[in-house]
Amino acid sequence: MASQDHLDKIGDIAAQAGLRRIHILAWRDLADVEAGGSEIHAATIARLWAEAGLDVTMRTSHAQGAPPESTRDGYRVVRRAGRYLVFPRAIASEIAGRHGRRDALVEIWNGMPWLSPLWARGPKVTWLHHVHGPMWAMVLPPHLARAGELLERSVAPPLYRRSRTVTLSESSRRELVELGWRANRVSVVPPGIDGRYRLGAPKAEHPLVVAVGRLMPVKRFDLLISALAAIGAQHPGLELVIVGEGAERERLEALVASLDASEWVRLPGRLRDDALVSLYQRAWVLASASAGEGWGMTITEAAACGTCAVVTDIGGHRDAVVHGVTGVLSEPSELGAAIATVLIDTDARRRMSEQALARAGELTWEATAAATMSVLADEARRRRSAR
């Protein structure tokens, strides 16, 4: 629960800009079986805004087993239409006012934009965690991947270059500016870390490497498994635990079987919060072979539990990890060797884990919610002054 001082600050920022009713357009809901970091980010900020006294409505697509409309953590969630129909239907509902009156709009651009500059009046802000780039080809058939990349690189930027945009890292900000966004219209607000991620259980007695995320091609868990298989002989007792669910499960299980690695690779699916926290605390290293991230929230979650990271050197990871200080950034081909070095060097691992813990203490969701509201409030004041 956020402190009253933090909530008062968020409420004051909104009130001074005349904001009370906020609508959020999101592709997926936190209740969705494929919910990930983007959904946690949206749900946490919506909860804190609601606790601060704002009237928040989140419109999203249908989530399996969840009702079409409900209240969660003080804000309203409307779940209607499928993965793709949600875009035209939600836009039509906003234009017709079926979600009620609003003082400002937030659109979360997660692959597909909502094109709010074309139809939404009043203050609005886009949350865009990262540019998808090569990820399109990893998750879609070739013709759809080409369409997605064309939309992201050529069609949408001219529409959004003047739009106020919030992203998670300086890496993502630079990518957006390269695509055509105006630099002074893009703000960086890092994600926070939930208070349940903290020091606790002692480190495992054996080398334990943990990776967390949806089992999707972009996460490249196959690369991580193969990299650790190549160094396994150097580290007796090595264990790799990959937490998450997704479309890649069968392929990853087949890879594990082909490498005869079932004794040291575990894929437990999703874990309860307390089990995940314990795993972070016991891990020697948090690893990620991802091809693209806006930030890499699992990195800082593990850091808050006193665990350093060895991850691919990509945008987003470069902001979540300070190379050589809180962890190691590595080329994909060298990931196994980088993990092996950290597992062997006890002193370096301990030092980086301590630095990661200290840095994680600077990242709170209350600060994220306040800073994100500040961007929306600035946009509301700017539009009022222009009028």
Image (spheres, rainbow, N blue to C red):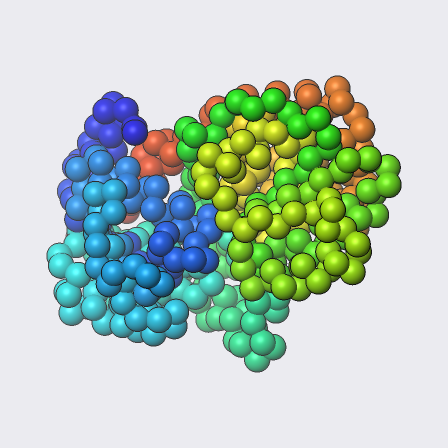
Can you give x and y, in whole percent of width and height, for residue 318 in the image?
62, 40
The quarter of the picture where residue 202 lies is top right
Asked if 28 appears above or below 264 in the picture, the reply is: below
Asked if 29 appears above or below 118 in the picture, the reply is: above
Q: Residue at x 54, y 31 (%)?
A: 278
Can you give x and y, in whole percent of width and height, for residue 281 in the image?
57, 28
Q: Residue at x 61, y 54 (%)?
A: 219
Q: Count the labels in the image.
A: 0
- In this view, the residue farthest toward the bottom is 143
Can you give x and y, in whole percent of width and height, for residue 217 in the image?
62, 61
> Which quarter shows the N terminus?
top left
Q: Is residue 209 left or right of residue 151?
A: right
Q: Residue at x 41, y 28 (%)?
A: 195
Q: Is residue 312 in view? A: no
Q: Is residue 109 left or right of residue 73?
A: right
Q: Is residue 210 left or right of residue 119?
A: right
